[in-house]
């Protein structure tokens, strides 16, 4: 979502050199007299290489993580359509990609700074920086943060719902915390260890304001957790200081290491600090170095692009849009948009000839992932995350619920004969699966592709005899095609990564997305041609679709008015907060 920028190398290097010089300067009599006067903070702009788009997509737009000693920085970034982790030395400015980290997000450091952990392909993995060796640690379907302690305990949030999990040094996993649903808690996420390695702070997402914020729990007695601070997102830990965001202000709150309670007053550490869609804070800190990024705009634009990537127009004003699907004739689009008043997701219909969109879903629950019937008269979508609803595209008659499920679902596609819906269904043992929902009363839904890895973005072929989808069984998402209604003759279409397949109207070409790029591959029966890169959108594609003739693409891209600004690097950031709290203690 946010593209960070090139490094202003001279400023950054100057910051680190000044810091090192200050640390190594001999102590004279003047310095002895002024030893209680902290060095002044030194600020610089942080901008990555111009070829990199920092972040791992719309859910993980920041991802910067400073090493424990503050001398190295790791972050996910996209180059040439592929996401990987990049490691940068803050003293030399040398930056390199870390091998075998494709699709990585939310990196975190080991306490000794020798390993970097990260989420990728539904797992938590760790890379040894000295030799590049990789370790597969545990499953985490949709990661919301992880942290290590020196003893080898790993605490992590595996999904967007539920509590924290602990993986012990022996590799055994167990539940650490459980959300209190009776008081509106839905998720515990973004854990961070305090310096003793036995206490963990984490963010609680809750509907009750008195429950949300930063909480603390111990590994020894996790049930005795308590709230530390009301905050708007995750907490960053640096020694005995807690960094958190209040609106757009980054606050630094000292903690008493004897009782792990707040002490003194919170001091301002930075202004205009952003938060991500998963409650992550755009900041990272070591005892001496702090980096924080500004808020990113959520506004998107629907942009028409030709097959060669040239822009051929837009569709409406900037909006907060997520999913989009084109109608069969290619003149209307069903979008999932965030309602600015209710702050809930709803399904809308937009037409090129109509300036005002039409709202299709009317409930106050989350409504998303709309798909068109083959005649373009109806739209099916997910209501309240667990029900399949259908309504006429003109929004005249009431919606009809045709199926309901216990786990969260998504609607992927509607078959060309109008007889079936293809949905995504989440299961604890097989993760994201593909299911078929017959639109005939009395015939139950059935699994189509269910295995111990993720299968997503399924779409019916125009002739209804096969389904294309993305699977991460190889360790990365690639495109596969299998027969329908019964699978069993599967083809692997890509080997270098791909997701979100779309068919051309005659079924002889499949389009797919690889990072910021859109590719095409010819297909005829069991013959698969070579992949062809059509264009690079130059920004994160949140969703897209293509007209039946394969000549025009509608992309959901960041609005041109939402260009991001540089992150801020601060050396000796604790000087001001330390001084302020010494004054508080003296009073």
Image: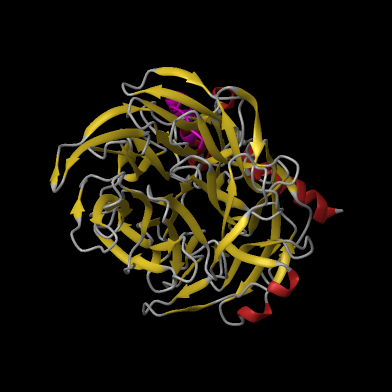
Instruction: Left or right? Give the position of 357 relative to 138.
Output: right
Q: How is the image coloured?
A: secondary structure
Q: Residue furthest left?
A: 527
Q: Is residue 135 left or right of residue 586?
A: left
Q: Quadrant of residue 330?
A: top left
Q: Residue at x 24, y 52 (%)?
A: 481
Find residue 58 and report its horizontal and vertical position in percent.
50, 42
Q: Is residue 280 visible?
A: no
Q: Nearer the viewer, residue 425 or 537?
A: 425
Relative to residue 23, is residue 202 drawn left or right? right
Q: Which residues are magenta?
A: 1-16
* Residue 443 x, y percent position in the rendering: 44, 70
Q: Nearer the viewer, residue 524 or 20?
A: 524
Q: Position of residue 455 (x, y in %)?
A: 35, 58
Q: Residue at x 55, y 76 (%)?
A: 176
Q: Is residue 306 visible?
A: yes
User: Where on the picture, by quarter, is residue 396?
Assistant: top right
Asked if residue 111 is among those painted magenta in the image, a careful observer would answer no
Q: Is residue 228 above or below residue 3?
A: below
- 82 lies above or below 173: above
Q: Is 37 or 376 nearer to us in this picture?
A: 376
Name the foreground residue: 513 vs 397.
Answer: 397
């Amino acid at each position: 979502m946010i593209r960070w920028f090139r490094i202003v190398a001279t400023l950054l290097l100057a910051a680190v050199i000044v810091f090192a010089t200050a640390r190594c300067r001999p102590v004279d009599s003047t310095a002895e007299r002024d030893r209680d006067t902290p060095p002044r903070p030194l600020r610089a702009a942080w901008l990555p290489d111009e070829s990199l788009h920092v972040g791992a997509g719309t859910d993980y737009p920041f991802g910067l993580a400073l090493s424990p000693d503050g001398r190295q920085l790791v972050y996910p970034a996209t180059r040439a359509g592929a996401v990987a982790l990049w490691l940068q030395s803050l003293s030399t400015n040398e930056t390199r990609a870390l091998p075998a980290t494709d699709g990585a997000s939310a990196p975190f450091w080991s306490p000794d700074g020798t390993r970097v952990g990260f989420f990728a392909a539904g797992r938590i993995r760790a890379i040894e920086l000295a030799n590049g060796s990789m370790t597969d640690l545990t499953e985490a379907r949709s990661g919301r943060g992880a942290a290590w302690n020196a003893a080898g305990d790993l605490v992590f949030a595996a999904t967007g719902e539920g509590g924290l999990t602990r993986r012990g040094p022996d590799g055994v996993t167990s539940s650490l915390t459980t959300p209190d649903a009776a008081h509106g808690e839905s998720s515990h996420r973004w854990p961070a260890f305090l310096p003793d390695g036995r206490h963990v702070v984490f963010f609680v997402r809750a509907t009750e304001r008195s429950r949300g914020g930063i909480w603390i729990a111990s590994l020894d007695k996790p049930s005795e957790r308590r709230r530390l601070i009301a905050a708007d997102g995750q907490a960053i830990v640096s020694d005995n200081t807690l960094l958190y965001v209040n609106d757009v202000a980054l606050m630094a709150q000292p903690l008493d290491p004897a009782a792990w309670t707040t002490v003194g007053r919170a001091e301002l550490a930075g202004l205009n600090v952003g938060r991500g869609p998963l409650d992550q804070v755009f900041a990272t800190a070591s005892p001496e170095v702090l980096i924080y990024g500004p808020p990113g705009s959520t506004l998107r634009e629907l942009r028409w692009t030709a097959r060669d990537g040239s822009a051929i127009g837009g569709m409406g004003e900037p909006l907060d849009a997520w999913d989009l699907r084109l109608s069969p004739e290619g003149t209307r689009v069903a979008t999932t948009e965030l309602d600015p008043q209710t702050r809930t997701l709803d399904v809308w219909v937009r037409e090129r000839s109509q300036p005002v969109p039409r709202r299709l879903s009317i409930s106050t629950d989350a409504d998303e992932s709309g798909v068109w019937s083959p005649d373009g008269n109806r739209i099916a979508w997910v209501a309240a995350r667990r029900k399949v609803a259908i309504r006429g595209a003109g929004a005249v008659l009431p919606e009809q619920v045709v199926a309901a499920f216990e786990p969260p679902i998504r609607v992927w596609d509607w078959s060309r004969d109008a007889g079936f819906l293809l949905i995504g269904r989440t299961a604890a043992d097989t993760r994201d699966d593909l299911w078929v929902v017959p639109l005939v009363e009395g015939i139950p839904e059935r699994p189509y592709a269910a295995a111990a890895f993720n299968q997503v973005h399924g779409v019916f072929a125009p002739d209804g005899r096969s389904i294309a989808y993305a699977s991460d069984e190889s360790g990365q998402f690639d495109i596969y095609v299998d027969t329908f209604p019964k699978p069993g003759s599967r083809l692997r279409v890509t080997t270098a990564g791909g997701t979100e397949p779309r068919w051309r109207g005659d079924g002889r070409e499949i389009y797919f997305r690889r990072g910021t790029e859109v590719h095409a591959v010819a297909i005829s029966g069991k013959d698969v041609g070579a992949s062809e890169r059509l264009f690079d959108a130059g920004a994160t594609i949140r969703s897209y679709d293509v007209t039946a003739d394969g000549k025009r693409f509608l992309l959901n891209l960041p609005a041109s008015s939402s260009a991001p600004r540089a992150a801020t690097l601060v050396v000796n950031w604790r000087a001001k907060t330390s001084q302020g709290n010494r004054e508080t203690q003296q009073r």
